[in-house]
Image (cartoon, helix red, strand yellow):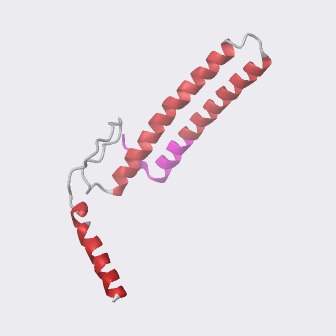
Amino acid sequence: MKSSLFALAIIVLLLSSWPALSQEPLELQYPSVPGAQAPTTTDTPIANYAKYVFVFIISISGIIGLFILIYGGFVYFTSAGDPSKTNEAKAYIKSAILGMIILLLSYLIAKTINPQILNW
C-alpha cells in the first residue's frame, strides 16, 4: 500500500512539472552583455548559457578590478608617507593586477581550448 502511494506521488510530481518543460519565453530578463546574447527561451542550449555567464563574469570582474586598482592608487597618494597605509595600498594594487592577470589567462585558456567559444 505504501509503495503504491509512493509511486502515485512520484507520477503526480512528474506530471505536474510537465508545463515547466515546454519552450516558453523566460520570465526573467537577463542584463545585456556585449559579446554574448542573453538566453530568451527555455530551449536555449547550455553552451549559450555558459558563454553568457563567462562573458558576464569576465566583464564584471574586470570592472571590479579596475575600481580596486583606482582605490589602491588613491590610498597610496593619500597615505602621506604612513608606512602602514602605503603597504595597504601596495597590497590593493598587487591584488588588482594579479586579478587582471588571472582574468586575462582565463580568457586565453578558453580561447585556446575552443576558439569558437568566445566569438564576440
- Number of numbered callouts drawn: 0
Q: Is 114 covered by the magenta stretch?
A: yes
Quadrant position of residue 24: bottom left
- Residue for point 21% across, 63% down: 19
Quarter of the figure with the N terminus: bottom left
Q: Left or right: where does residue 34 sit relative to residue 99?
A: left
Q: Is 68 covered by the magenta stretch?
A: no
User: Is there any visible trace of residue 118 in the rendered image?
Assistant: no
Magenta highlight: main SS:
helix
Residue 53's x, y, as percent? 41, 46
Residue 102's x, y, as percent? 58, 40
Q: Left or right: where does residue 3 sit relative to residue 20?
A: right
- Please name whichever residue, 76 or 12, is drawn nearer the observer in this view of the structure: 12
- Residue for point 47% across, 47% down: 111
Quarter of the figure with the C terminus: top left
Name above or below for residue 35 compared with residue 78.
below
Name above or below for residue 97 compared with residue 114.
above
Q: Residue furthest right?
A: 83
Q: Report the span colored magenta.
A: 105-120
Residue 109's x, y, as percent? 53, 48
Q: Left or right: where does residue 63 sit relative to residue 74?
A: left
Q: Residue furthest top?
A: 80
Name above or below for residue 81 compared with residue 16.
above
User: Is there any visible trace of residue 44 in the rendered image?
Assistant: yes
- Residue for point 29% across, 47% down: 39
Q: Residue furthest bottom?
A: 1
Name above or below for residue 45 compared with residue 4.
above
Residue 27's x, y, as percent? 25, 47
